[in-house]
Structures are given as structure tokens and as C-alpha cells.
Image: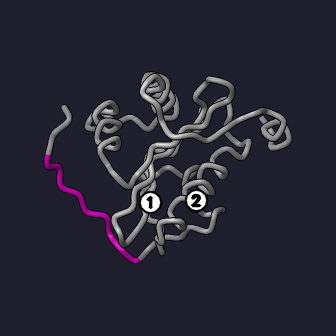
Amino acid sequence: MSDAVSEAVALEIVEFQEPQRAAVIALWQASGLVRPWNDADKDINRKLTDPVGRLFVVLVGAAVVGSVMVGYDGHRGTIYYLAVHPDHQSAGLGRRLMAHCEAYLLALGCPKINLLVRRGNDKARGFYDALGFSEDEAVSLGKRLIPDV
């Protein structure tokens, strides 16, 4: 789908609604975001308890074709689970989702966005590079407190 086609297609970015759960998880699976150590259902549940963060979805008609989780801790904004269905990639939807998140975070007074890209995901790295993101002089560390599986 080209940029010209995506402009002609009526789409909207809205906050996640419960009836969209299965479609969002299927989108994440189709986009290669789901990992065995992360339960997508639990991740949605956790995001829904976040009073500041949001889970946005891109709808074309009633179909979920994109999603993104955005958070803000009062110091930095964070992007998670950015996904565009493979049939709709390279149409500008990822850029629109990121612009939506940036506007949301700016309205909260957020000064900077952080996000993680898995090593070897050159396609995602190129996407974020084109949006002006660059590698920080930091190392991401993690510690699992609640196992999902």
C-alpha cells in the first residue's frame, strides 16, 4: 500500500476498546512482536491499569491495522508494541502513529521519548532512524519481577 493509497483510505487512531483485544493480539503476532516470555493479554491488562499511558489502535473501518502503547513516567515517554499489519506497512501508518504519540506526550509536558529495538531488527531500526531517533549512550537492563509463563 503506498502513501497515496493510505491517504485515500479512511482511517482513525483511537484509544483501545476491549472488543479489539483479539484483533490487537493477532496484529502483534502477525507483526512478529509476541515473544514466549511476554503474555500479550497480560501486557494489555497492565497497560489498561496505567493512569497516564495509552494503547492506541489504527482502524480502517472496523479493522485493527496498527497499534502502539505509549507511557510517561514524569521524566521520559516510552513507546512499546508499535505494530502495523504487514499488508499495510510502508503506507505511512507507523509515522502517523508515532506523530500521534509525540503529540500525546508533548501535551503531558514530556521532554524525551525512549524506545527499545531488538538487536538484528534492522527494518525497525531504519524506521526509527528516519524519524530522528538515535542510539542513546545507555544500556538497557531488565529484571523480571512477575513471570508471564
- Which residue is most to the bottom? 137
- Helix, strand or loop under label 1: strand
Instruction: Give the residue at x 43% y 64%.
Output: 77
Instruction: Give the residue at x 35% y 74%.
Output: 138
Quarter of the image where the N terminus is located: top right
Measuring from the top left, give residue 94's x and y in whole percent. 63, 47
Mark 1, residues whose alpha carbon is within 10 Å: few (<14), some, or many (≥20)?
A: some
How far apart marks 1 and 2 lie (CA) works out to: 9 Å
Amino acid tagged 2: Tyr
What residue is pinned by disc 2? 128
Amino acid tagged 1: Leu
- Viewer-nearest residue: 51 or 114: 51
Disc on res. 115: 1
Instruction: Give the residue at x 51% y 29%.
Output: 27
> In the figure, 91 relative to 17: above or below?
below
Answer left or right for 113 relative to 123. left
Answer left or right for 4 relative to 32. right
Whichever of labels 1 and 2 marks the residue nearer the N terminus, that label is 1
Q: Give the range drawn in magenta.
A: 137-145
Disc on res. 126: none
